[in-house]
Structures are given as structure tokens and as C-alpha cells.
Amino acid sequence: MINSLKKYYPVFFLVVVILVSSALMMGAEKINRAALESRQDPATLALLQQIFTNATFYTYSVDTEIYTVYNSGRHKLGYAVYGDGMGYRGRITVFAGLRDKETIENIIVIYQVEDLSYWYRLELNNFFDQFIELNVEDCYPSFTWLPGGVDSISGATFSSRGVVNAVRDAILDKLQYID
Amino acid sequence: MSGFAKEFKKGIVISNPVFVLALSLCPVLAVTNTLDKAIGMSGAFALVIIASNLIISLMRKMIPDIVRILVFIIIIATFVSIVEMLFQAYIPTIYSALGIYLSLLAVNCLILGRAEAFASKNKVSDSLADALGMSIGFCLALILISFFRELLGKGGITIFGNELFTLPVLGDHPISVFGMSIGAFLVMGLLVAFFKWIGVIKDV
Amino acid sequence: MAKIKKDNLNVTGEEMLNSPAPHIHSKWSVKRTMYLVILALMFPTAASIYFFGLNAILVILTSVLAAVATEYLIKLVRKKKFVMDGSAVITGLLLALTLPPTLPLWIAALGSIFAIAIVKEAFGGLGHNIFNPALAGRAFIQLSFPAPMSVWIAPSGFAPDAVTSASPLSDAFKQIGDNFELYMDLLLGNTSGSLGETSALLLLAGGIFLIILRIIDWRTPLAFIGTMAILSLVLGQDAVYQVLSGGLMIGAFFMATDYVTAPLTRTGKIIFGAGAGVLTIVIRLWGGMPEGVCYAILLMNAAAPLIDRYTQPKPYGLKKK
């Protein structure tokens, strides 16, 4: 009985080694994750959580200026990029979240100096909801001669177009870096 | 001389992993263009080889012969992953500078070579001495090569962001060849020649 | 093939054999050959001094002195006899002739030191180097100091005000003047460029002088320049211009014919020249650099032992396989 089991000793040993090694690596990953999460900028993470509600972790690439966003299980939720556009009064900066190469997750406006009454029109008319799950190819300001696109809010056309252009500025030349 | 001291000394000069054995040249040539990266790589190498030599030597009677290489590689790869994650957690600048070469330690011929040729056949204290000696020899070699490469290829020495000094003429016109991989071969070859000439390294 | 006794091979105290027996004794010693090559190189040297004045003299002197001093020091360190056989002078001179006139002198000296110390002596000295030392030295400083290595000035003799201008091989230059004037300028050397590569006519004179004296073989330069000319015609380029400009003349006559780094067989020499020609035109037309002669010859140097091996003449009486 024991002799016949001895034959399987190498397999048994290998399994034990693999299990121990996995346990060790899991431990190391816990330390790694705790350290990385403690280094996150809470303000940026808060912004990212406005776009991706489940976001708990992000990485930032200095070369491509892309934030990659993860949930608590370290599954990739998407990407986020900053972009600028010109509104009626001046610069509009948005933080645009991308689910993948094709779809926009959501956007938030970081900075704008538009007149308050016009800006409220955008919010009241659910202008920003248009960006949720928008196809990247449809992300352009709509014109009467150009069907589709993101509808501007009448009375606040320049602000609307400024936001759309900011999103385009953010995502268009970054699409090549993501997969 | 006691066994420990003998095995310890061996790795530093007589069979220096880089200059004499000419093993694991991939990290040597790839990461020695700055002193920072060389120090980071030496640290990672030392951690992995000490841990793997220790564990393999402890388990040497248990490891079945038929799967021994597999077991060595799993053990080494585990330690490399752990070191990689710790580097990413605590010294991210060096982690990103080393890039892929940190993970490549898992298939480093020197670490596997010491595990197979030494640690799996010798007692724990000797294996530990061997690992310590090897990592000090590796570290010295990397620091020597990267010192000259950074000095000539960048015109000055900078350690962890602190500029130590800049050479007068080369500071403005560094010999950029030494930053490229050609420079690694040149510096290494010249150092080996120099050590042979002054008699530190004997002909094998 | 019978094993050759080592004692028979001593020329100037070192083993100098690089082809199998039989050997014909030549009246030319290594020293005499070297000095004749230096004599031939005096043509382009004189031209460079005429066109670039003081700059040329300084660069050439620095380079030659650094080369000879390095060789002397290395022989001293290695406790070997220093023979003033002129090979170091040739290396220094050839290197200087491929450098731009305004190069800082310490860079020229560095190139010479690299050429002699690393490329020649580290491989065992005269007769043992794999690559042409002067070209490898040039490649070294080209890689290290790309900016100072691409400053070209218009030839102005000893006049003090040097004007930077485009190198003949850059596109900007090609638009100036009609073709005949351009060709004449290239032929006589009245263009900007490296010190010794401007005057095609004088380089040709030096080369023919060496060919007549049977110091160099006519096959390599002919194959090199011929391939360049034919390929430029085929690819729709200005053949005369491609042949006369850049470092082709000095490369074909003085560097591709180096005894040590080129193949020994006649067929091999033709293959060597043709290969260098193809590589040069490929680098000039599609490469990132304007000039490709240097790298083309270095690459063919690396292939020379292989060419020798495949073109070895079969001993008489043996069947071809």
C-alpha cells in the first residue's frame, strides 16, 4: 500500500510546492495592494469614483497620461483622461472615463468659467447624461447639417460645444494607447 | 579555513558570476546604464538568490529528483514575484526603471545554476554562504560596470536623484555610446581585461 | 593541407600569416607598403588643407599624434616592441580624413584612441583586427557625438570666417546650381564635407597610384564604385552624383582595400566591394543617415571571414563537390 503511494510522491510534492507558493504570492500581493492603495491620491480617486462608481484603485502612466481604473477585485473598469475645450467664457476641463476603445463611461467637468445661468441650463436639461455609454464615434457636437452627435442645449450652445470638444480632446488621440 | 568563509569568498573573486563565470549577462548588460538601476537589480538579485538557495538547501532531501528543476523554477519564480511586488509597493521608481528585467530574474541562469549545482547538494550554511558571496560578487560587478557607464555615458554620477559630481568636458558632451548596449560590452570587456592584467582573475 | 610551422611566419617579430601557403616573397615589407599608402594619402590630405586650412591641419595632427601615442603606450604597457611601421599613422590619418573640419580636437583624439586601443590592439594588434580601425573609430564618435559630427562648413581655405553649410548628401544641397557645376565642384573638392572626402579627383589619383604600385587590388574599388553606379541608375538616382559625393572614393580606395579586414581571394574582393556598394546605397536612400559608406564597409568587414571561406580556390586536382 505505502509502496504504491510512493510512486505518486513527486506529484504530491509538486502540488504542495505550488500551493505554498501561491499562498506566499497572495500574501505578497496583499502587502503590495495595501501599499499601492495607501499611495493613491484620494482626490483623484474621488473624481474617478464619480465616473466609475466601483473604482477603488487606479494606476497612472506618465508617458500616455492615461489613468487606468480598477475595482476592488482588481478587475479593470476602464480608463480616464483629462481634456480641454473652449466654452463661451474660457477653458473647460473635463475628466473623461472610457469603458473601452469604443464606449465612453461617463464624464465629469473639472474646471469651467461659464456664466452660471447658462451652465445651469446644461445641468437642468440633462446635457451630461448624453455622454453616458456614448459611442466614441458619436462624440461630436451636433449641427443641423450633421445628424447624430451630442445635442447642444439651445441658449448655451457654446458651452455645450466646449464640453464636447473637451471630451474629444481628451479621448481621441489616446485611443491608440488603450486596448 | 572554515567551509562558510570558503564558500563566501569564492563568489566574490575566484568565480565572480559576471567577470569569471560570465553568467546572467542579460541583466548586467541591460540595467547597468545608471548606478540606481544597478543597485536596485543587485538588491533584487541578492534577495532572490539568498531566499531560493536557503529554501532549496533546506528541502534538498525532500525534493524528488524527477521534478527537481520544476520545483527550483517554481521556488525561484515565487521569490521573484514577491520581490517584484515588494519593489512595486515600496520603491516604485526603481521598479519602473528596471521594467521587464526584474521579472526576467525568474529565468536567470545564475540563480537556477546555483540552485541546481550548489544548493541542492550542500548543507544550509554553505548554501547561504554561497548565495551571499554570489550576490556580493554580482553587486560589485554591476556597480563597477554601471559606475563607468554612467560616468562616461552621462558625464556625471547621480545616485537616487542626488547629483554627486559632473565631469568638466564630458558633462556637456557625454560619450553616449556608453549608455547604449555597445557600451556595456565595451566596459565589461575592458574590466575583465584589466582584472586579468593585474592578476585578480586567473586564467581558467 | 600541411600544418605550417610557426617559426616560419615571423615578420617583425609577430605572426603575420593570414592566408594558407604557398607564399611568394615580395620586395615590399610591411613598413614600405605603409609609407607608400601614407604617400598616396597625401593627395587628399593636401586637398583638405587647401580647402579647410588651419582646421584641417589641427584635426589631422591631433588624430595622427593621438593614434601613434596610443599605440606606443599600449606596446609599453603590454611589454612589446613598438615598431614605427606607419600603420598607426595611417589609421590616424584615415580617421581624420573622415571627420568634419570643425570637430572639437578632443573628440578627434578620442576617436583615434578608440580606433587604436580597442579596435586594433585589443584584438591583438596589426594583422589581427576584425574591423577597420579608422572606420570603427569614426563610427564610435558618430554614435557618441552626433551633433558635432554633423556640422559642415563651406571650404574657405585659410580665411577665418567659416560658414556652416549643408553636407552635399543632404537634400538642401542638391538644389543649388546646375548639374555640371555641381559635378565639377564634387570632382575638385570645392564642397563642404569631411576633410578628405571632398576632392574625388585627388582621391582617385591616390588610389590609382596605389593600384599601379600593386599595393591595393583594383577589384574592390571597381566593384564598390561600379555597384554604386549601376544601382543608382537602376533606382533612378543621379549616378554621377552618388559616386562623386560623400565618402565613397576614400572608402573604396583606402578603406575597403585594407589588407587585414578585407577578403584575400580575388572573387572575395569583388563580393566584398559589391556588397559594400549595395549596403551603401541602401543606407543612403532608405537609412536614417545621409552617408552609409562607413557602416557598409564595417558590415562587410564582419562578413569578410565568411566570404574568404566560401571563395577559397580549390587546390588543383581536387574535384569540386
Image (spheres, coloured by chain):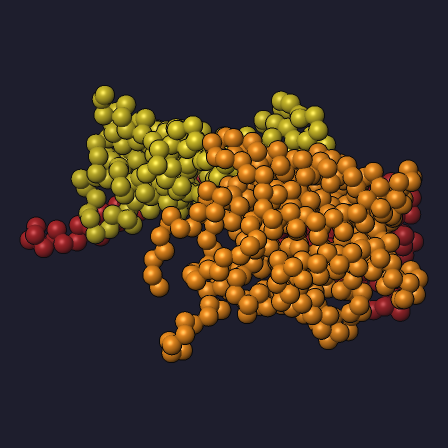
Q: Which of C308 and C148 is in front in this view?
A: C308
Which residue does the image show at 40% across and 78% down from the upper left? C320
Where residue C159 sits in the image (x, y, percent)? 91, 40
Q: In this view of the protein, which residue sits in the foreground, B114 or B69? A: B114
Which residue is located at x 73 percent, y 56 percent?
Answer: C206
Supply the letter of whichever chain is orange. Answer: C
Which residue does the image show at 60% across and 30% down from the upper left?
B151
Q: In this view, does C41 lie to the left or right of A149?
A: left
Quadrant in which the C terminus of chain C is drawn: bottom left
State how many labels appear.
0
Work out which residue is located at the far front of the displayed protein and give it. Answer: C27
- Name the tint of chain B in the rendering: yellow
Q: Residue C319, located in which quarter of the rendered image?
A: bottom left
Q: Is residue A28 visible?
A: no
Q: Which residue is drawn at 50% across and 48% down?
A: C128
Residue B30 place in picture, x, y as percent: 52, 42
Q: In this view, does A70 lie to the left or right of C110?
A: left
Image position, residue A157 (x, y; %): 89, 54
**Residue B119 visible at all:** yes
Which quadrant of the view contains residue C22?
bottom left
Instruction: Return the residue nearer the eye: A69 or C237.
Output: C237
Say above or below: A115 vs C192: above
B17 sits to left or right of B117: right
- Relative to C248, say whether A62 is above or below: above
Instruction: Say which of C29 and B76 sits in front.
Output: C29
Identify the hue of chain A: red
Q: Quadrant of the N terminus of chain C?
A: bottom left
Residue B21, position in %: x, y? 37, 40
Image quadrant assignment for residue C171: bottom right
Q: In this view, does B119 lie above or below A165?
A: above
